[in-house]
């Protein structure tokens, strides 16, 4: 179930710590922070200062920032140490060896003390009101466990190139509609046993799909985050693998969907979603389940097919 707001278990996987050294002494206070923010980073020195500053500049100040240095070999450790020395809300954990993004997230959340969880990337920027608005959304909707909002896309130089509107969790089968600005209760982390470390690249989409089976979401129609797209970003570097894994987890999730028409719509939408992987079998299966979906969509379907035929032709002709 989703709530739309207008603009105005077992944690064995999380507890695994077979290669982590905490570089900063744990900050122990009588009362834990309300929010735990995890920032995983691997050789992310280029944008790391801006990412950390955006958290420290939040209008909601009752948080801890857990920075997980995932085996960095650049200036990342020095940057993290300087911030931790200056602000007691910051804790630094080092993974040795590198675990990858989902492993780094699990390391961070295993150390989290807050009742609300979120994470951010070393190359992205949280708008100052992000935590305040997301906390308020969950406080106003006690039945909900996850709040999320819109975000802007920026380029390597920080220029805004577009606004991405998120969608309700009910549309998750049609794509990752949750976005980059989110906050969820600690029970979500515990129930889902963290992020699947075998799904590096789509660990967030998998997490939201599993969460949607059990938890209610609150959707804010507000721009709360700046998501950076650049040449070194994970999304661009591993696009082909990400598309293959997306297909894998979507097929798994469809097994839980009894609605034939919804399954068909998801297969057709996802079948045409990738400009890297054809997904022809998925598209064909969706149309076979519900032939009526082709009505009014012949042109985009033909364009999709033509695009992939042309890609194959170009590869073969060099």
Image (cartoon, helix red, strand yellow):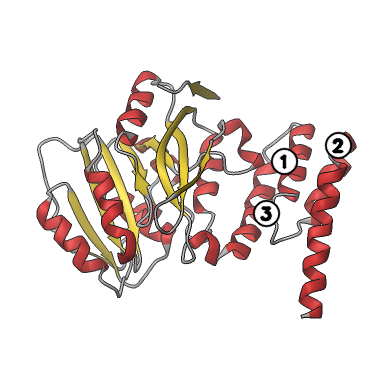
Q: What residue occupies the far bottom of the structure in this picture?
A: 318
Where is mark 2, residue-wise? Answer: 290
Q: Position of residue 136 (x, y in %)?
A: 33, 24
* Residue in the foreground of this view, choosing between 273 and 197: 273
2 or 3: tag closer to the N-terminus: 3
Residue at 30 percent across and 75 percent down: it is 73
Please tell me whether mark 2 sits on a helix, a strand or a loop: loop
Residue at 30 percent across and 68 percent down: it is 19
**Toward which corner of the image does residue 256 lie, by quadrant?**
top right
Is residue 112 visible in the rendered image? The answer is no
Where is mark 1, residue-wise? Answer: 266
Rounded to the nearest whole Å, what is the CA distance between mark 2 and mark 1? 11 Å
**Toward which corner of the image does residue 102 lie, by quadrant?**
bottom left
In the depicted structure, whether residue 200 falls above or below residue 63 = below
Q: Position of residue 187 (x, y in %)?
A: 38, 36
Q: Position of residue 153 (x, y in %)?
A: 48, 47
């Amino acid at each position: 179930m989703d709530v739309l707001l207008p603009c105005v278990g077992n944690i064995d996987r999380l507890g695994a710590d077979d290669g982590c050294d905490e570089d900063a002494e744990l900050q122990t206070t009588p009362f834990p922070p309300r929010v735990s923010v995890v920032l995983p980073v691997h050789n992310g020195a280029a944008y790391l200062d801006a990412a950390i500053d955006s958290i420290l500049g939040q209008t909601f100040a009752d948080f801890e920032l857990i920075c997980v240095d995932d085996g960095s070999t650049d200036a990342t450790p020095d940057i993290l140490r300087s911030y931790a020395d200056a602000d007691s809300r910051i804790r630094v954990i080092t993974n040795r060896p590198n675990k990858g993004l989902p492993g780094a997230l699990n390391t961070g959340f295993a150390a989290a003390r807050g009742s609300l969880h979120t994470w951010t990337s070393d190359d992205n920027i949280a708008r100052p009101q992000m935590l305040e608005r997301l906390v308020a959304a969950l406080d106003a909707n006690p039945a909900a466990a996850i709040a999320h909002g819109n975000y802007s896309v920026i380029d390597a130089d920080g220029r805004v190139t577009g606004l991405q509107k998120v969608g309700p969790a009910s549309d998750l089968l049609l794509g990752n509609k949750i976005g980059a600005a989110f906050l969820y209760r600690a029970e979500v982390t515990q129930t889902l046993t963290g992020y699947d470390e075998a799904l590096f690249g789509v660990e967030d989409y998998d997490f939201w799909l599993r969460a949607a089976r059990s938890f209610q979401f609150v959707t804010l129609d507000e721009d709360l985050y700046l998501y950076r797209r650049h040449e070194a970003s994970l999304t661009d570097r591993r696009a082909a693998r990400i598309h293959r894994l997306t297909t894998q987890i979507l097929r798994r999730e469809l097994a839980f969907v009894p609605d034939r028409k919804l399954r068909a719509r998801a297969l057709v939408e996802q079948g045409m979603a990738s400009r890297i992987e054809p997904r022809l079998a998925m598209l064909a299966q969706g149309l076979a389940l519900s032939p009526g979906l082709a009505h009014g969509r012949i042109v985009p379907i033909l364009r999709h097919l033509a695009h992939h035929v042309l890609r194959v032709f170009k590869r073969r002709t060099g």
